[in-house]
């Protein structure tokens, strides 16, 4: 059962965010569909950025 008070985030690696997710078309889709992102650094095993 889905709890409407919880948010689901898409976790992506920092390098992918800095290249693919910065393209204008991808940014538009992310904004239009209000996709929540967590940008992570795989090597340091840490969250770099939360994007709401």
Image (tube, helix red, strand yellow):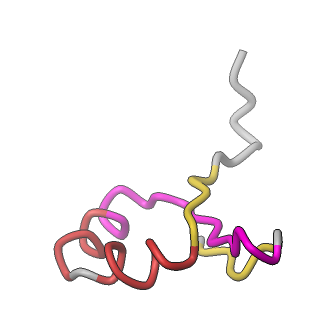
Residue 25, how many percent across, how many down?
17, 73
Q: Position of residue 51 (x, y in %)?
A: 60, 75
| Res. 22 image quadrant | bottom left
31 shown above or below 6: below
In the displayed structure image, the side of residue 35 where residue 46 appears, left or right: right
Q: Residue at x 59, y 71 (%)?
A: 52
Q: x, y percentage for residue 2?
A: 69, 24
Outermost residue to the left: 25
Q: Magenta segment: does it hold 42? A: yes
Front residue of 11 and 32 = 11
Q: Is residue 15 above or below residue 34?
A: below
Location of residue 5 (image quadrant): top right
Q: Which residues are magenta?
A: 30-44
Q: Residue at x 36, y 70 (%)?
A: 31
Q: In this orientation, which residue lies closer to the viewer: 15 or 24?
A: 15
Q: Hey, which residue is sitting farthest right in the picture? A: 45
State yes or no: residue 29 in magenta.
no
Q: Nearer the viewer, residue 15 or 31?
A: 15
Residue 23, position in %: x, y?
A: 24, 80
């Amino acid at each position: 059962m889905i709890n409407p008070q919880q948010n689901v985030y898409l976790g992506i690696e920092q390098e992918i965010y800095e290249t693919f997710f910065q393209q204008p078309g991808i940014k538009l889709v992310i904004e239009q569909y209000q996709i929540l992102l967590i940008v992570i650094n795989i090597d340091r095993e840490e969250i770099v950025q939360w994007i709401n």
